[in-house]
Amino acid sequence: MIIVQAPVYLPEVVQAVVAQSGRGISGISGPAAQVEMTKSILGLSNRPTQLDEAEILFSLALQDLQIPEALTSAKVQCRLPYPEELELLTEWCAAYNVEALGKNHTPSLRLACHSVIEARQDMGMHWVLVAGDTLVSYSAFNASLPDIVQIGGVWTPPALRGKGYAKSVVAGSLLEARSLLVKRAILFTGDNNQAAQAVYRGIGFLPTGEKYGLVLFEETQA
């Protein structure tokens, strides 16, 4: 994966990185315009992809977090997962990767998801939403600093969508972050994913005007 952030001298930077690393290219990410330029620089513009999209950057000052009524009335509960729930979350992680990132549901994907879920559990960086005794939604922090977190991996099983669960699980995770003096949260969502955008706007997130490009190739490029 090439991650670009070079507003100037992009061709020189990209070519030097590829030459020095000696690695294949599984994808490209970074500011959307730079991602498109990088594909062209490397002659990869027409290669088949699993995913090729621009995502909108959303931001929220946690003092402005809007808490869903379902959380405030305790109709649902947001908490850290229990160890016995990790197998289910591994399946949810795999389903997220298939739906959101265009990956194939293979044994290797499941193993990778198992490692991701275990790591998040060890770091306390993921949450589940519970309605009654049933897990209904999931959210995680892809990255965390003392004053800012990045939301990622938000997943609600298809049969449970349209009930506000994603909104509540994200808000619940951010309530905990706010209690630890985190000041801001960011996230990316697909330019055409109106449902996800509505969820995040519903708890106070606003677009910053920046777009993030993400390309995942079907096969690693030499």
Image (cartoon, helix red, strand yellow):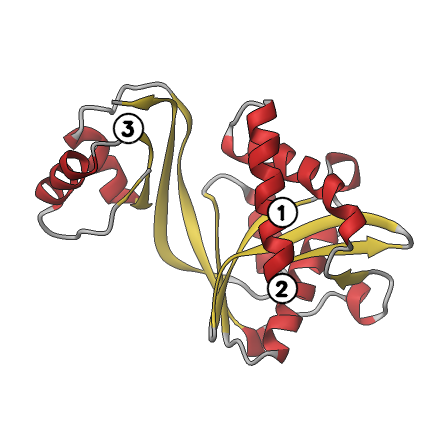
CA–CA distance in space, label 3 to label 1:
26 Å
Q: Nearer the viewer, mark 1 or mark 2?
A: 1
Q: Is residue 179 above or below residue 5?
A: below
The amino acid marked with disc number 2 is Ile
Q: Secondary structure at mark 1?
A: helix
Considering every residue shown, the one lying at the far right of the view is 132
Pointer 1 residue: 117
**Image location of residue 18, percent across then percent down:** 18, 35
Residue underneath mark 3: 24
> For the residue carrying disc 1, how many other residues have a C-alpha within 10 Å: few (<14), some (14-19), or many (20+)?
many
Q: What residue is drawn where x is 64% and y is 59%?
A: 170
Residue at 70%, 69% in the rendered image: 67
Q: Few, some or many C-alpha atoms within 10 Å of disc 2 (few <14, some 14-19, many ≥20)?
A: some
The residue type indicated by label 1 comes to Ile
Marks 3 and 1 in Cβ contact (< 8 Å): no
Where is mark 2, residue-wise?
203
Crowd rating for badge 3 (residues with CA inside 10 Å; few <14, some 14–19, many 20+): few
Mark 1 and mark 2: Cα distance apart in space: 25 Å
